[in-house]
Image: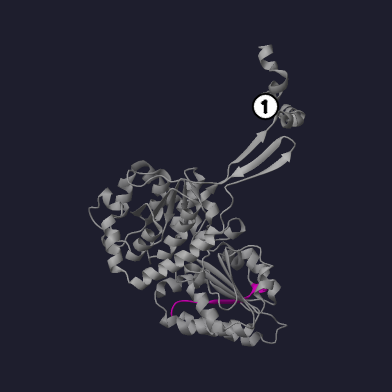
Amino acid sequence: MITDEADESLTKWECLRKKVQIKLRKADMEIKLFRINQLSDAEKEKLMQRSMQDVASIYDYVREIIYDVRDRKDKSLVESLKEIKKGISEEELLVSEEEIKQAYEKVDKKLVDYLRIASENIKKFHSGQLEKELWAIKVSEGIIAGRLARPIEKAGCYVPGGIASYPSSVLMCTIPAKVAGVKEVFIATPPQKGMNINPLVLVAADLVGINRIFKIGGPWAIAAFAVGTNVIPKVDKIVGPGNKYVTAAKMIVYSLGMVDIDMPAGPSEALIIADESANPEWLAVDFLSQIEHDPDSSAILISTSEKIAQEVAQIISAKYEQLPRKEIYESSLSKYSYILIAKDIEEAVEFANEYAPEHLQIVTKEPFLVLQKIKHAGSIFLGAYAPVPVGDYASGTNHVLPTGKGAKMFSGLSVDDFIKKPTFQYITKDGLENLKDVVVGLAKEEGLPMHAEAVKVRFDGCDCIKKA
């Protein structure tokens, strides 16, 4: 609630907030309008945790699914699809060559061209991330140390497909793996009725050169990649976005030591920092664009302009009745989506850094000055002409990004996610002799006599053998 006795605009803002809420309540939905410094601790904590609260609540349920797939393999997968089609065989979990061929016949050639253009940009951006296969330095006299870059062998890419299908996620998940040199790249995606996959998803996978595509979704897909079944291979790493069930499954299989994952990449979220120079209609559309993915998605607008905040709120309320997929908007707008007013850019940036958004838009007069103050964000979009959907599809950066404050710890998906970096060292006799006392002294202090002997034996013989 906006309250500030020293603010002469109190009445105006209180009336605005009530007006917006009344309009939206007619559709059983409410957009929240607050000043940042007047958010209650509970409201602020809710915003900071957002979808991760929902992920934590389903851990037990998802864990049982993972154990069931581990124990019963493909039988568990087939049973999870019984509402899609009756009497499914294990062989139907794998997309056939004929299905891919037919997909090209069903897809508009212009869309195939669009996928190619997007693919080229994504490949170009990610190719720039490749490091040298080997680098080495002289640490000291007689010691050369370095690091190798080697790709993992098998990657499993999860492509969402429940509420909508995402051929763009095919490109985002698999192209970095291909650029990194991963030998085998697989896709799992939820089938639609009749065990069909969106043809554009199949075309996108074929364009990239995916080894195999599997018709399975949710925690079952994650578990199958983690443990391996008769049909689906066990992989070294699972990547890709998904809903709260997919996110929970990824975190569980990682915690159990079954497989590596990229990051928690759950329901979409966006935070927009805007000043008085921003276009309110563009902001309203940008706000709405990021909460149409999933009922647990979230959007935050922080404006230093009360006028802009007011206009955006009014535009959203006016557009609501015309929105498609209203049940998704109703949930995402009412749960974790807010319009906030900051006293200045510094307060907006402070909140944004604490929030650590998946997507961050900076729509200000000097976006690059604001950029220098940002500490935590998955992907950052600068200026009025950089809406998040451009990054979702075709600008080249990756749209598989950390959510739920994960940007404080993780980066977006990149070539690095598919590369291991073992170190090496070459040491001469003189180099080892220079470090002899250091290693022996520290090893003895830690109570590890054989560590010390491994160095001493190369100069003095082995005391332990003589004593034995």
Q: Position of residue 32 (x, y in %)?
A: 55, 76
Residue 121 against residue 98 in the figure, above or below: below
Secondary element at image label 1: helix
Q: Residue furthest toward the left?
A: 87
Residue 9 lies in what quarter of the image? bottom right
Q: Position of residue 183 (x, y in %)?
A: 44, 48
Left or right of 139: which side holds 380?
left
Span of residues in magenta: 27-38
In this rendered view, identify the residue nearer to me: 252 or 360: 360
Q: Position of residue 7 (x, y in %)?
A: 70, 84
Residue 34 against residue 297 in the figure, above or below: below
Q: Is residue 26 visible?
A: no
Q: Position of residue 382 (x, y in %)?
A: 60, 73
Left or right of 115: which side holds 90?
left
Q: How many labels were placed on the picture?
A: 1
Left or right of 223: which side holds 133?
right
Residue 442 lies in what quarter of the image? top right
- Residue at horizontal 69 percent and vertical 77 percent from the top: 343
Q: Is residue 112 visible?
A: yes
What sort of colour scheme is used for the picture?
one colour
In this rendered view, identify the residue nearer to me: 174 or 402: 174
In this rendered view, identify the residue nearer to me: 94 or 39: 94
Say which residue label 1 marks: 451
Residue 5 against residue 398 in the figure, above or below: below
Instruction: Tell whether position 303 is magenta.
Output: no
Amino acid type at circle 1 is His
- Residue at horizontal 68 percent and vertical 12 percent from the top: 466
Q: Quadrant of the N terminus?
A: bottom right
Q: Residues within 10 Å of mark 1 (few under 14, many from 20)?
A: some
Q: Quadrant of the C terminus?
A: top right
